[in-house]
Image: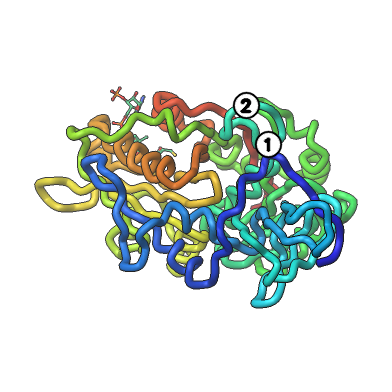
Amino acid sequence: MTGDPTHDPAAETPAEMPDESTRQSARQGEVPTSDGSAPTATDSGTDSAGHRLSAALTIGNRVVVRYRLEEGSQARATDFVGELIARNDDFLIVDTKKERVKLIRADVIAAKDVPPPASRPGPAHERVSADDLETLMAKGWVATDRAGLGDWVLRYAGGFTGRANSALVVGDPSLPVDRAIDYVERWYAERDAPPLFQVHGERGFALEDVQAGAALLERGYVAGAGRPDWTRVLVLTGPSADVPPLTTESVPVTADAKLSPEWLMTYGRSRSVVPGATEAVLTGSDGQLFLSVRDEASGRIIGIARMAIHPGWAGIFGVWVDPEHRRRGIASTMVSAAAMVARENAMPAIYLQVSADNADGIAFWQGLGFGVHHEYTYLAQPTA
Ligand SMILES: CC(C)(COP(=O)(O)OP(=O)(O)OC[C@H]1O[C@@H](n2cnc3c(N)ncnc32)[C@H](O)[C@@H]1OP(=O)(O)O)[C@@H](O)C(=O)NCCC(=O)NCCS
């Protein structure tokens, strides 16, 4: 071990030290049953996904590690909290607030992934900072090609979605902002793609008030790139505990850890896809579930949603219901199923993103108790 212990009272008690096989199991997720009873495993060997999902110990995630101290120390053990940088059979490397520490695995008593820290008082879905939530959400929709620039995340996925093809402006890019923008422009040029930036702020924020936003506007970048759905996107959050439970009246919801061709085909009805990139992004998180509802008469899928699984958080993406079957509670039931999985897997908070121009979508989410956490805008060059 090197360095001093760093305590974080907000961190949870670490779970037992997981191994690689545990991580594989965590990816398989679990299935909510349509009658509201306890979830069951999708694959053999995944009996208690809740524990496993929260103990994946994933590189890039925030982790808490309970570590045995040397003989003669005042305390027997201490906790390290920070980003897991690397792991192998012998060591864990963790970036704590103070410094990078190398922890001998044999002295690790327990360890697990934990949610981003609280930046203010309040329930789990409110107390996270916008920067931390943005960083978490990027792990729920993972681009095929990624690079870090300080805290910024550069993402490319063949043009499939703004989220997976934009530079996420969070924290410090480790360069003066103008040089960071130059760097991003070159990065996208190398991929023959137009540079796109995702800039966030508090509800109703002005781009001019965000340093990168002001610098981009000065260069002639345009908010929304001519797309109304990109001008302002709301990040909504809510407590999984407050989503209405499934009832015996609820339509049956299936949840699958695997992306099926039929789910993907239905997804293609809701938006344009990029073969290859779409599948990679949809399946690129540490854990995800694909929810669907079928029409009783035809057997066809008529409602879909994707759930991304994080430590302490669930993300909901791509909720869509066939226009002929709307206003019958199908989307609400899928969200109830997702919330049930969240509750049973120690995920008290749920996030989602909805365009500010989607009045129907916003009405739907607000009806389920979700509120605006922050907002973001995509900025592109006028020619893009
Ligand atoms: C938004 C959407 C998923 C709702 O699906 P749905 O199955 O019709 O939703 P539900 O029947 O569960 O609606 C539950 C409640 O949400 C609200 N709601 C749903 N659609 C609404 C609409 N078009 N306008 C106003 N409120 C709406 C209502 O309060 C509704 O309850 P009610 O029907 O008793 O009034 C569906 O319209 C859709 O697929 N839209 C296109 C994709 C989209 O916008 N997805 C959400 C963005 S993330």
The kind of residue on which mark 2 rests is Gly
Q: Count neighbours of disc 2 (C-alpha within 10 A) and say few if under 14, some if 14 to 19, many if 20 or more.
A: few
Q: Are marks 1 and 2 in contact (CB under 8 Å)?
A: yes
Using the image, determine if residue 40 lies above or below residue 102: above
The quadrant where residue 86 appears: bottom right
Q: Residue at x 22, y 36 (%)?
A: 250
Judge left or right: residue 24 versus residue 235. Answer: left
Q: Which residue position is annotated with label 2?
A: 122
Q: Nearer the viewer, residue 275 or 150?
A: 150
Task: Residue 141: give x, y in percent of width and height.
Answer: 53, 55
Q: Residue at x 79, y 33 (%)?
A: 208
| Label 1 near ligand 1 (CB < 8 Å) | no
Task: Residue 63: give x, y in percent of width and height.
Answer: 66, 55
Task: Residue 339: give x, y in percent of width and height.
Answer: 40, 39
Q: Residue at x 58, y 34 (%)?
A: 124
Q: Quadrant of ligand 1?
A: top left
The kind of residue on which mark 1 rests is Ala
Task: Residue 75: give x, y in percent of width and height.
Answer: 78, 52
Judge left or right: residue 113 versus residue 298. Answer: right
Q: Which residue position is annotated with label 1?
A: 118
